[in-house]
Amino acid sequence: MNIQNYISVNKQRFLDELFDILKIPSVSADPNHKEDMIKMAEATKTALEKAGCDKVETCETPGNPIVYGEKIIDPSLPTVLIYGHYDVQPADPIELWDSPAFEPIIKKTDIHPDGAIYARGSCDDKGQFYMHVKALEFMTETGNLPCNVKFMIEGEEEVGSSSLDWFVRRNQEKLKNDVILISDTGMISNQQPSITTGLRGLSYVEVEVTGPNRDLHSGLYGGAVANPINILNKMIASLHDENNHITIPGFYDKVLEATDEERKEMAKAPFSLDDYKKALNIEDVYGEKGFTTLERASIRPTLDVNGIWGGYTGEGAKTVIPSKAYAKISMRLVPNQHSDEITKLFTNHFEKIAPKSVKVKVIPHHGGEAYVTPIDNIGYKAANKAYTETFGVPAIPQRSGGSIPIVALFEKELKSKTILMGFGLDSDAIHSPNEHFGVFNYLKGIETIPLFFKYFTEMSQ
Ligand code: BES
Ligand code: MN
Ligand code: MN
């Protein structure tokens, strides 16, 4: 039986099984969901066993368990390591969901005329890692598995993969592979597949600005004492200049600038600024001078406030000068910038620009390094051949703005290249209310993955 037939016979079951795991609210950021993390790890383990892995285990870590599975058919054949994550982002703000985040349903949209699965994690990353489980099922059930396969599905990606360093260092032999395959990114459109060739790094910090030792009456003290919210806003505003360059000294020093050639190549990707603006309901885009929207969102480093709070935000008015103000700030990094160094540069600068009237504290959160991969390796070629067959057109290489810190870590620790075969679309609303994943995309993934295995094995010989 070929893969198309296998999918058409099993389509409903593939959807039902995905629905079952989407119902488990495995939100790694929320300690109240600890039990759901265990439940989801168990469900992943069972799924891998059923799909044909010989050895499956849930590995304890200092955080959530990592599910490891393998099917080794012949040690002399190549080994593909699949990575994915079973944890999801919080569903908040839940009131903005049109249907409950953990009760998956299929709805048709303009972009997904065959329907899309609405649920938290449908695209990021349960729907995408589950494509690999079903692809494995097809290959083992029908005698089409051409090489060895390993799975490593973790439960802390959305909170910075803090146990992964630990796990990868301790399990070098177990994780040994010839190529790593990840579906946790997107592609240009359902008509135009693309392979992600770069990811940005990340430095994430929280800042705390303290003014007076207690909240003050804003009439009695207003104007005479520094208001930490006012100050924090001033400090944040000063982090970009009039051209939207980041003002932290040394921030750009190590940036590996894209060559004119690369930028020319990038500009060939289909992209409509009008559609982009329309989809976001904005009059205009905004960003660093001298770069296009696609470049700003992929090959340039950024600094963004993710949340800011302090003072009185309840109902009505309260006249108060708060004692403290806070913000969470993310910096997306590009190749050659190092997360730890950037965090240090930020910290020094932020402390330096604070007026004497306040104290500032910078608390580093997680980070990760950027990644770029060449396209002249057999992993990329095998992926492209697979896409060409299932989509009818070759894939376009494209650098993404998102981050998957494990990819750089894998390269450093395991010395292997990662192929990012993502099947999501930017419009799938990952991390947002109403996250969804096209039924077409889910099934196309299941169809394309076995071809990658086939061509990668052939090209390895
Ligand atoms: N799957 C995403 C990353 C992604 C999405 C990359 C789309 C490229 C295209 C991943 O789950 C994610 O959200 N990563 C975080 C980083 C992490 C350290 C919290 C991110 O990019 O914010
Ligand atoms: Mn993800
Ligand atoms: Mn994510």
Image: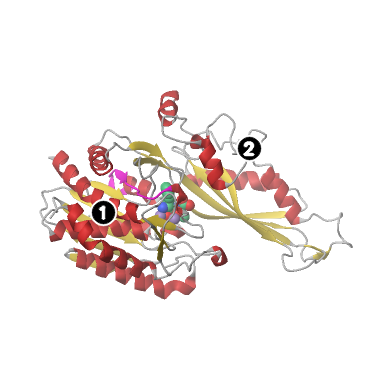
- What range of the chain is rendered magenta? 413-425
- Magenta region includes residue 421: yes
The answer to whether 164 appears left or right of 230 in the picture is: left
Residue in the picture at 28% in, 49% down: 181
Quarter-of-image position of residue 395: top left
Q: Where is residue 349 in the image (x, y as percent from the top left)?
A: 63, 43
Q: Is residue 367 visible?
A: no
Q: How far apart are marks 2 and 1 (CA)?
A: 45 Å
Between 126 and 118, the one lying in front of the other is: 118
Q: What's the mark number on residue 446?
A: 1
The vertical placement of 372 against 6, above or below, is above
Count of numbered badges drawn on the protein: 2
What secondary structure is marked by label 1? helix
The answer to whether 304 appears left or right of 11 in the picture is: right
The image quadrant where one finds the N terminus is bottom left
Q: Main secondary structure of the magenta part?
A: loop
Q: Mark 2 points at which residue?
A: 247
Q: Where is residue 171 in the image (x, y as percent from the top left)?
A: 27, 58
Amino acid type of the residue that numbered disc 1 sits on in the rendered structure: Ile
Q: What's the mark number on residue 257?
A: none
